Amino acid sequence: MLHKLIIQNFKCYKCFTLEFNADVNIIVGDNEAGKSTLLEAINLVLTGRTAGRLIQTEISPHLFNQAVAQEYVDQINAGANPVPPDIIIDLFLKNDAKTAHLKGTNNLAKEDVPGIRIRLAYNDEYAAEYKTFIDRKTATAVPVEYYKVEWMAFSGTAITQRGVPVAASMINAANIRLQNGADYYLQKIIKGHLTDQQRVELSRAYRDLKQTFSANDSIKIINDILDNAKGDVSDKTFSLGIDVSQQSGWESGLVPHLDDLPFPMIGSGEQNTMKILLAISRRLEESHAILIEEPENHLSFATLNKLIGKIEEKCKERQVIITTHSSYVINKLGLGKLILLNEQQPAKMTELDPATQDYFMKLSGYDTLRLVLARETIIVEGPSDELVVQRAYRDTHDGRLPIHDGIDVLNVRGLSSKRFLEIAAQLRKPVHVVTDNDGDPSAVDKKFEDFVEYTNITIHRSDDATLPSLEQHLHSLNGRDKMNRILGKNFPDDEKMLAHITNDKNKTTCAVAVFGTAETVSMPEYILNAIQ
């Protein structure tokens, strides 16, 4: 079992540590968050290969963390002699009899545990050539020509593929050829459901069918025409026929159909599902861990949930690591399996307060992951607040809505906003809370005092206790006449207007009117501060 992974200077990861769940791990993050690189690192340390090729032949400057590589290049060109950067991937394994020979302290954590390390490092056998390289002061990249690959156990001994007691299968539906899967699928179904006698009958019927090909009247005419042209290639009789040898049996000639469609012609979603499940079936016995990359491609919400359920069922005795940027996956597997990636750093939901974990386990999961996938988030406490914030943003950002700039306006219930902030504190992404002061600004400050220390979290509320709600601010700033025009009403006095717009039944309708009006709408300062 994979216990922990530490990565140093590999691609987007400068310094990264992740402890795995023993069963299912759902790695969630936006594009470029490092999900694929994480699986690549695991596969590399277990197999010594990248993209199917030995790492020794694939060492490239692009494997190094860009910031580390650039710092190294700058120092060389400035006349310094920096230590050449190295790439280290340490994979910590479960301590048992099968991994005991891998135990040692040769890892970045200096822990006396079993594990495997792969290291790309400067080879001092090239000291003379390297000195010439740095003396030129014209470096543009890490000089990988002078590097070596060390693949060893934490015990310090070199290892080979045969010496690795843990196997992982990397599954990416985009890289699996469907025809191979179809052949395997067909044979698996037939072997599992037909008796030996029925399989013999299938083989005989297939051979008889091929032999009738030459007896077809149209084929006879075609063969006569071809025989007349035999002098071009041979003096012997020339004709077409179907191979009836053992090498051309039903296994390669029959094609499975799903709902009367040939296997290769089924929809992309069904194809991806079949590819993934077939790959798991073929590799399950030989693998301790299953690595699956973005299974959601081409899949609807319902189909994806079915696939995740089947993956769980098939891999009950295996460790599973799935990467995804789909918010749906959590519905099936639960918050406790979730690992969020943000700026190449992990945040586990299991690190949250137990009450908060329980709260989010009862939600669909979509709102939870919106915090991960958005570049920035504005949290509001109702649909009316959301519409007004959207309008304020559009007015101050050349007609763009927040989502156009990667900002998600997240509508949560008032009592749950603190729960979302607990996640925000783990993610370290900018999150801004827009809230009413409810007539007591100091009480709002007290409510959110646990988050004052987080520089990525800001709380925005009005200082005016006489205006406890957003609706009262809009009325105060825009006046009754303009608000009547915006709402399409004709309230004769402020009291009746305020009674209308602060009524919970009317708040959303009023906010829709504010969002869609052609009138210029003055917005409260605390909202403007939140959307800057």
Image (cartoon, helix red, strand yellow):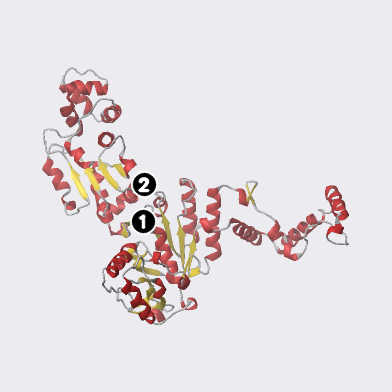
- Front one among 465 and 121: 121
- Within 10 Å of disc 2 (Cα), the crowding (few <14, some 14-19, many 20+) is some
Is residue 66 in view from this perspective? yes
Q: Quadrant of residue 471?
A: top left
Rendered position, 428 above or below 401: below
Residue closest to the eye, 36 or 371: 36
- Name the residue nearer the viewer: 297 or 56: 56
Which x, y percent locates residue 218?
Answer: 83, 47
Label 2 vs 1, first from the N-terminus: 1
Answer with left or right where residue 158 lies relative to residue 254: left
Callout 1 secondary element:
loop
Amino acid identity at mark 2:
Tyr
Residue receiving disc 1: 33
Where's the N terminus, which quadrant? bottom left
Point out the image quarter for the C terminus: top left
Task: Give the number of the mark in front: 2 or 1.
Answer: 1
- Answer left or right for 292 relative to 112: right
Q: Is residue 43 left or right of residue 393?
A: right
- Amino acid carrying label 1: it is Ala
- Residue 414 lies in what quarter of the image? top left
The one nearer the camera, 342 or 307, is 342
Residue plotted at (25% across, 19% down): 489
Whether residue 270 sits left or right of residue 501 in the image: it is: right
Q: Position of residue 267 (x, y in %)?
A: 56, 47
Q: Which numbered disc covers residue 366?
A: 2
